[in-house]
Image (spheres, helix red, strand yellow):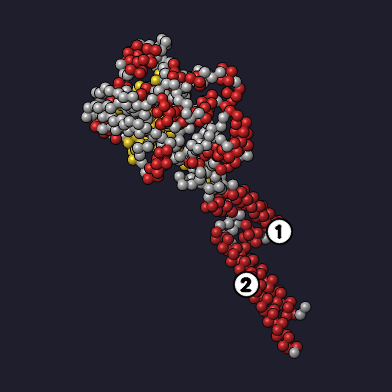
Amino acid sequence: MSTTELKERAKLRADLKDLLNDFSENSTAHGPPKIVQRKFILAKLFWSCLFITGICFFGYFSYKLTVKYMNYETTTDIELTFDVLKFPAVSFCNHNQFRLDRIPQDLRSLTEDFIMSDRFEMFGGEDYFYDYFMSNPTDSPLYIPWWLETTQSVSSSPEYSTSVTEGNQQTTQVTGEARRRRKRFIAELDDNSVAVMKDMEGFYLMPNLTSKAEDITWFSETGSPSSGSSILLNVTEYVASYTSDSMLRGMGHDIEEMLQGCTFQGRTCGPEDFYQFYDRKYGNCYTFNSGMDQQVAKVTSPGAPFGLSLTLFINQPMYVPALSKQSGVRVLLHRQGEVPLVAEEGFNAPPGMESAIAVRYIEISRMPGEKYSNCTKQSLSEGSFHEFYPGNYTQQACLKTCLQKGIIKECGCANALYRSPPDVEICNVDKVACLEEVEENLLESDVCLGSCPIQCWESQYQHSISTSQWPSNNYEPYLEQTLKTRGKALKKMLEASNRDGLREEFVKLEIYFDNLNFYRYKERPSMTFEDLIGNIGGHLGLWIGMSVISFVEVFELIVSLFAVCAKALSASKQNKVEQMKQFC
């Protein structure tokens, strides 16, 4: 090695040492200056070990923070808010699916062996009835319901008017003061909600309001009905004019019979305020404040006087033996635009009791995207969940749709407990094994659960129930006399009953908000990228005493080291070139 090369290397080492000493003495980081400035070796070793230990702790906590960030955990914020609230849609069904006096005689005479058999219990007695009518569409009930026997034209005072048309199309118009009263406590729907309600048009039906005039007076208060009736349909015409689904609805309980009292916020309401839908388990069901008229009732004050009060006649003598194990009604509180899943999400209200249902509204907002909750924001135009269950997306409706599609594909028939296309026949008892196998396979494989995530935003109407005896002993005789004057049909039913009291025949519901405070549960990321950088910076300052300025100084040191090395390398090459020239 030549003398020149030795000098160059010595100069390079000196320059590098100067750079490192300058950085160590002037760095804003706390460790390096302490190491350089100490004169004793033990002191230098102590500060060196301390600095290296700080780097290790910083690396450990930075790793933990990065892992936590990559887990995409969420934190739920709870906000208590006060506002005017939308009253929930209230759906209810009689526990008895079919009236005993409206079912065919051959179905009434089902053998006790079959009713009590394991197959009947497993498949559900109600499903046998449904399957019977799907398989025998030409069979007709031996009894024509009284609401199909006659058509009434009702005229009333200017304050109340009701019109009913003949045939399959029933329309009801409420005018005058009654119409004005209904508009005082309503909220207009936004464009998205209007689209949802249009999607629900195939699900809800207007209730059949062709009842006798005496029954309508209970709801119109001051109406003066006129008499007159005509035979609407005989048995043959009835069978020819109605589809199987309509026959099933005809065998169920009617809203005009069930609804013996209705007030909302102190104002009288009637059958025209309810929409009808058919549930495969409970039969005819009815919804108050469904939003189908593109208006939703709102509540400005809490308490029972500002809620919904219902008096429902369940007519237990018409319960089908061995099929109706419970008496009373099934009730569900839900938001508008959702298919009421009464069997899965509803609760029971017993007869002979007043059920005071205090409602509390909550909103839940989840983080979208697979990183967090894998929730969905499906709209009406996305996915296939609303083929059977229209309206807003719900996980339960999606699961039922998925299961039903699998059953139809594998078994060639549909489960009677789920909604299905009208052109697909219902599985009979012989298909139970196939039905159960398909459902079990789909649930075990998580096919349906994987394709039906929870919704990103939802609102819930939570409730608490308290009950008391209704009617009281002293009020019961008065109630009985009052009811007998409000309709011949109801009077006949009450007189035909062998019961000593009315408690077993009526359900009383009081539904109201206990207060207008509601909670918003909103998910947010437990750690955002900004939080990650801030936390790493905090640990950097804690363990090493460095900041962004310190990193700039380190970057400057690295650039300077490269510059010195590059300069030395360039000088070395230049010297070699000059030496080669001298040699030549």
Q: Is residue 153 above or below residue 363?
A: above
Q: Residues within 10 Å of mark 2 (few under 14, many from 20)?
A: few
Report which residue position mark 1 lands on: 41
Q: Nearer the viewer, mark 1 or mark 2?
A: 2
x then y, percent, for residue 46: 68, 54
Give, as a three-letter code, the residue at label 1: Ile
- At x 61%, y 36%, the residue is 438
Quick one: which residue is furthest to the bottom in this view?
A: 584
Circle 2 sits on which residue? 563
Q: Is residue 485 visible?
A: yes
Dot 1 or dot 2: first in sequence order is 1
Residue 251 vs residue 215, the one in the foreground: 251
Disc 1 residue crowd, few under 14, some 14–19, many 20+, Cα 10 Å: few
- Which residue of the protein is positioned furthest toward the left in this rendering? 158
Left or right of 568 on screen, residue 123:
left
Q: Name which residue lies at 41% across and 15% down.
A: 503
Image position, residue 10 (x, y; %) = 71, 74
Residue 2: % across, % down: 76, 80
Question: Which residue is drawn at the image coordinates 42% and 11% (left, top)?
Answer: 499
Q: Amino acid at mark 2?
A: Ala
Whether 289 is drawn above or below 20: the answer is above
